[in-house]
Image: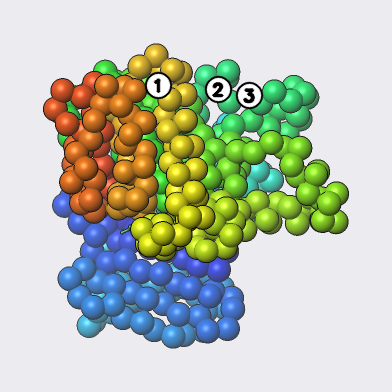
Amino acid sequence: MNILVINCGSSSLKYQLIDSDSEKVLAKGLAERIGIEGSVLTHTPAGKDKVVKEAPMEDHSVAVKLVIEALTDKENGVISSLSEIGAVGHRVVHGGEIFTKAVLIDDEVIKDIEELSSLAPLHNPANLIGIHACEKNMPGVPQVAVFDTAFHQTMPQKAYMYGIPYEYYRKYKIRRYGFHGTSHDYVSKRAAEILGKDRKDLKIIVCHLGNGASISAVKNGECVDTSMGLTPLEGLMMGTRSGDLDPAIIDFICEKEGKTVSEMNTILNKKSGVLGLSDNLSSDFRDLCDAADNGNELAAMTLDTYAYHVAKYIGAYAMAMQGVDVIAFTAGIGENSYGVRSRVAPYLKYFDTEVDDEKLKIRGEEMIVSNPGSKVTVMIVPTDEELSIARQTLELVK
Ligand code: ADP
């Protein structure tokens, strides 16, 4: 069966058409600037060059229509008609405490996702727009919602409660939810598979290091802790997000600089992280690594700080799980960045674990990088969130 995987943002829509039998991507693409002047669709059929089409897209429904046209196009299409799409899998960011796994979408589910929008005001409404646009253009095709938070719902209460008045949990469900769940689930499963072991028998720490970054502790197949919180701002320092900080800093800067809390929120989400710490050098780790290699001290300090934070979380989660068998690195930085991986590696010596420096230089490949005899197996496992969404969608519709 062909499954269309959709990741919808407020003005963009990413898609992949995946053949669930072969698990091959038949085509993928991106509709950008939806509802804004200059909308453009980039469609890439497998094994062919990308096709760029500029066309007005006043809303997401028009974008979905264009995606279907591209997929069924005589020249660059990969299917002959809409009837060859068996199901649609949607990435939905926030499932709150309601959704612990993927679900078939019906009116009730839509109502719940709507209600959860207060927890993810930038994401859930956009995800819903994508769902409605697909319902309109593909009537009768089953649709599935796969939640970023669902995998983390197994966390024990002691891991998800904050030390603030309990009434805020009671009234507003303020707690840790965690994100990137699809990736943490996929990578921990794949790591066990590569080792020929059952995930249920392992303690795994997954380091998802991309523009957004989070770490999770996966014990016996279940997430027991993760670094992102109520929102994706908590945890590791990221490309432009601050990650953990003393909450009193917000009031302090507001006072000194005459800023509002909402302005501070923007600063912490968009101007902080490695971009802010490097004094606006870059949020891209390639730039930071190049600069550090060329003697830029701020870039080196930023990378050292980043790696230290990653190491601290690894240490904390080893303690939380009372051990660790596998540490898996994934996402853009985890899969590729020698500069970051080589800075984290020395900390692992505390676990009687050494990694092969030459292997750390290889990019984007599944591999074990720890030396034989190491107490912990350190691995690189490229993530594939779309494939994971397609698999979960298939499970529900087959
Ligand atoms: P997201 O999906 O959260 O936008 P990605 O997982 O694509 O992010 O990761 C983006 C990050 O990965 C960027 O900071 C980029 O610099 C880094 N990255 C990608 N390729 C490389 C590379 N070859 N070397 C170092 N960093 C890389």
Q: Position of residue 369 (x, y in %)?
A: 20, 38
Q: Is mark 3 within 8 Å of ligand 1?
A: no
| Mark 3 crowd level (few <14, some 14–19, many ≥20, 10 Å Cα) | some
Q: Position of residue 307 (x, y in %)?
A: 43, 41
Instruction: Report whether 391 appears left or right of 317.
Output: left
How far apart, in angstroms, are the residues tagged by discs 1 and 3? 20 Å
- The earlier-in-sequence mark between 1 and 3 is 3
User: Ligand 1 is found in which quarter of the picture?
Assistant: bottom left
Instruction: Report whether 160 appears left or right of 198.
Output: right
Q: Which residue is mark 2?
A: 159
Q: Which residue is mark 1?
A: 318
Instruction: Tell me the quarter of the image containing the C terminus.
Output: top left
How far apart, in angstroms, are the residues tagged by discs 2 and 3? 6 Å
How many numbered callouts? Answer: 3
Of all residues, the one furthest to the top in this rendering is 322
Amino acid type, callout 1? Ala
Q: Is residue 246 above or below residue 125?
A: above
Amino acid type, callout 3? Met
Q: Is residue 331 above or below residue 207?
A: below
Q: Which residue is mark 3?
A: 161
Comparing labels 1 and 3, the label whose residue is closer to the camera: 1
Amino acid type, callout 2? Ala
Residue shown at 74%/42% (left/top)?
A: 249
